Amino acid sequence: MWKYYRVIPSWCRSCYKVVVRPRTLVELFDLYELMREMGVPCKCGVEPRQTVKDLYGGYFYCQGLEEGQERYKEVRKAVDEKISPDVSVILKRYCTEYEVGPGNAGPSDKLPEMTDEEKYLEEILVAIMPAGMHGSIHHDHMEAYTMKKWIHWAYRYNDPTYKEFTDGSDLFVPTVTYHEEEEEDGNITQ
């Protein structure tokens, strides 16, 4: 609805997210474990969106502001205890793209009510949307594949904590170089 019609769906309007911003790959894995322990609707991973400046993100999904405020308190306390009090935790409304992306809808606290036309469009789109479109199937191999991608992401963006998951080894062998460099004592090395 947003991509093609610039309409924020009703289910997104009531969605609030507690957002956690791990600073390193190690903190991302710590957040993953914390999420598993909490057992509430959530996800975490690398953050490739252009509208977000952080490398990693974690999201706890809540229906309504009141549930979001309660979850925020729980998550803030758990992050402080199990990861670090220096890790950012915020409560926000719906997806970032609606508020700050290209052609955005503006500040979430200024969002007007859905018009009758927008409600009708949503009814039509929901009726023709494939069943289960918002769901996903969980498989252990997909989880391992995703975590491997996290490690590669950390390497790519120079997060040295990836070595905690590679037994201290570099992820890739450095390329052979052939230029000469001058050492501090004036000698040339190759």
Image (cartoon, rainbow, N blue to C red):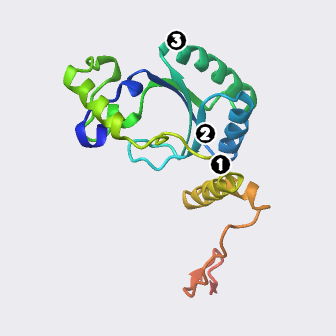
Between label 2 and label 3, give the one nearer the viewer.
Answer: 3
Residue that appears at 28% across and 27% down: 106
Residue that appears at 58% across and 81% down: 181
Residue 40 in sight = yes
Q: Name the residue under label 2.
A: 22
- Is label 1 in contact with label 2 (beta carbons under 8 Å)? yes
Total count of labels = 3
Q: Residues within 10 Å of mark 3 (few under 14, many from 20)?
A: few
Alpha carbon separation for disc pair 1 and 3: 31 Å
Sequence-first disc among 2 and 3: 2
Q: Which SS class for mark 3? A: helix
- The quadrant in which the N terminus is found is top left
Q: Residues within 10 Å of mark 1 (few under 14, many from 20)?
A: many
Q: Tag 3: residue type?
A: Glu
Direction from residue 32 to residue 61 in the image, left or right: left
Residue 68, percent from left and from top: 53, 18
Sequence-first disc among 1 and 3: 1
Q: Name the residue under label 3.
A: 66
- The quadrant in which the C terminus is found is bottom right
